[in-house]
């Protein structure tokens, strides 16, 4: 019956609203009688904080059961969905809003998908980490703080909508256990040849991805600020963010298939600039720049508001309580120091704040 003479073709288009090909593409939703058994309930490990608020999962803890939706009554017509894909973790709603249909929207959605980054977070063995805090705190507290910084950094990174996954490169078994419980993938530091070798090794675990190296000592990190930095980095082949002191680097990013070429350590801002990486704007992203090496850095981080694990350490460990009150003015509630911490809970899939 095809080709239809032009006249009757136009008539057909007018009567159906579709050409034959367009009509073939249009499909009604498939409806079938529901024969499925009720779907199983899913379990989410959580550990409530001391004050009763929910908190980041820190390991095996009480398991909260989420009841499954009641099954439809027998014989109900249900829309047949495509095969379900299991997500490793629920994703936060994308800032550009829900996915839309159409070619232009599809391109936009692809761009959003492409701009999801793999982060590489290096972490020294805790016994050696944060050595510049040794003057201010005893060894046990220094190790605890190094782990707390890393946990707050990784939890915030996992909650950032531009981040798809976080690889932690470490040989520390305790840190590995805690950070894996948050949702990070642990890669042993096989080269064991310093920070830059560890970063190259971690980046190799994310082939074909946009990769960003992020220091593990950013306890004030906010997911929305990290997303802002990564979206800015997406416009360049390689880009970096200087640390709060303007001497070092807290984040170095490379688009897919571009070698990361990390040159961290000491005055790395100058080295990253000389290597051709573009320096990203520093304004509006203080939490991504606020690395903590010294007691003064920790006070400055407290001014910004640190994450829940660092705040809990500073509140609960007798040797640390009251030790790092920030130098700034009192908070609106008259409290200082850890009392001014941000209370937002940062878990995977949590909304950005
Ligand atoms: N896996 C791995 N991570 C490292 C290594 N060296 C440094 N890092 C991490 O790289 C980031 C910046 O490191 P540094 O500032 O040199 O070390 P730090 O432990 O933060 O502080 P200091 O001991 O005071 O220098 C931190 O997240 C470190 O844990 C390494 O050799 N291997
Ligand atoms: C590792 C670096 O920083 P810091 O030693 O100050 O943590 C760096 O800036 O390259």
Image (cartoon, grey):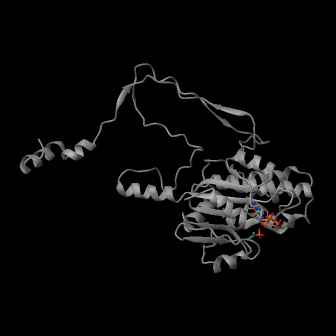
Q: Please state the total of marks drawn on the protein image.
A: 0
Q: Is residue 67 above or below residue 161?
A: above
- Quarter of the image holding residue 304? bottom right
Picture quadrant of ligand 1: bottom right
Q: Is residue 341 visible?
A: no
Instruction: Name the residue at the front extreme.
Output: 191
Q: Is residue 132 left or right of residue 188?
A: right
Q: Is residue 233 visible?
A: yes
Residue occupying image coordinates x 64% and y 68%: 252
Residue occupying image coordinates x 60% and y 71%: 239
Residue occupying image coordinates x 83% and y 56%: 126
Of residue 272 and residue 321, the one placed in the foreground of this image is: 272
Quadrant (top left/top right/bottom left/bottom right) for the N terminus: top left
In the rendered image, residue 91, in percent from the top left (x then y), is placed at 56, 47
In the rendered image, residue 280, in percent from the top left (x then y), is placed at 60, 73
Residue occupying image coordinates x 83% and y 61%: 129
Q: Is residue 236 left or right of residue 25?
A: right
Q: Is residue 234 above or below residue 338?
A: below
- Quarter of the image holding residue 216? bottom right
Q: Is residue 275 above or below residue 171?
A: below
In the rendered image, residue 191, in percent from the top left (x then y), is placed at 74, 61
Quadrant (top left/top right/bottom left/bottom right) for the C terminus: bottom right
In the rendered image, residue 32, in percent from the top left (x then y), is placed at 37, 26
- Quarter of the image holding residue 262? bottom right
């Amino acid at each position: 019956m095809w080709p239809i003479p032009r006249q009757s073709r136009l008539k057909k288009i007018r009567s159906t609203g579709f050409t034959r090909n367009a009509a073939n593409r249009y499909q009604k939703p498939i409806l079938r009688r529901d024969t499925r058994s009720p779907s199983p309930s899913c379990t989410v490990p959580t550990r409530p904080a001391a004050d009763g608020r929910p908190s980041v999962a820190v390991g095996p803890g009480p398991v909260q059961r989420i009841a499954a939706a009641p099954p439809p009554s027998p014989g109900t017509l249900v829309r047949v969905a495509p095969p379900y894909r299991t997500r490793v973790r629920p994703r936060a709603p994308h800032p550009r809003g829900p996915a839309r249909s159409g070619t232009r929207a599809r391109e936009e959605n692809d761009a959003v998908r492409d701009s999801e980054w793999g982060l590489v977070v290096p972490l020294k063995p805790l016994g050696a980490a944060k050595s510049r805090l040794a003057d201010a705190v005893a060894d046990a507290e220094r190790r605890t703080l190094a782990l707390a910084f890393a946990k707050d950094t990784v939890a915030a990174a996992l909650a950032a909508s531009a981040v798809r996954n976080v690889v932690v490169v470490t040989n520390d078994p305790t840190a590995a256990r805690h950070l894996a419980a948050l949702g990070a993938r642990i890669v042993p530091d096989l080269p064991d040849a310093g920070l830059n070798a560890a970063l190259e090794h971690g980046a190799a675990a994310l082939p074909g991805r946009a990769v960003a190296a992020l220091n593990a000592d950013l306890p004030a990190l906010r997911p929305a600020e990290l997303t802002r930095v990564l979206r800015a980095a997406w416009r360049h082949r390689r880009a970096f963010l200087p640390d709060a002191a303007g001497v070092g680097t807290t984040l170095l990013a490379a688009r897919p298939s571009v070698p990361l070429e990390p040159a961290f350590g000491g005055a790395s801002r100058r080295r990253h600039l000389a290597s051709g990486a573009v320096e990203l704007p520093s304004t509006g992203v203080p939490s991504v720049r606020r690395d903590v090496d010294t007691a003064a850095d920790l006070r400055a981080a407290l001014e910004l508001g640190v994450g829940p694990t660092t705040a809990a350490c500073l509140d609960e460990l007798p040797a640390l309580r009251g030790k790092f009150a920030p130098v700034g003015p009192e908070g609106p509630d008259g409290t200082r120091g850890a009392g001014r911490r941000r209370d937002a809970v940062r878990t995977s899939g949590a909304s950005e704040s």
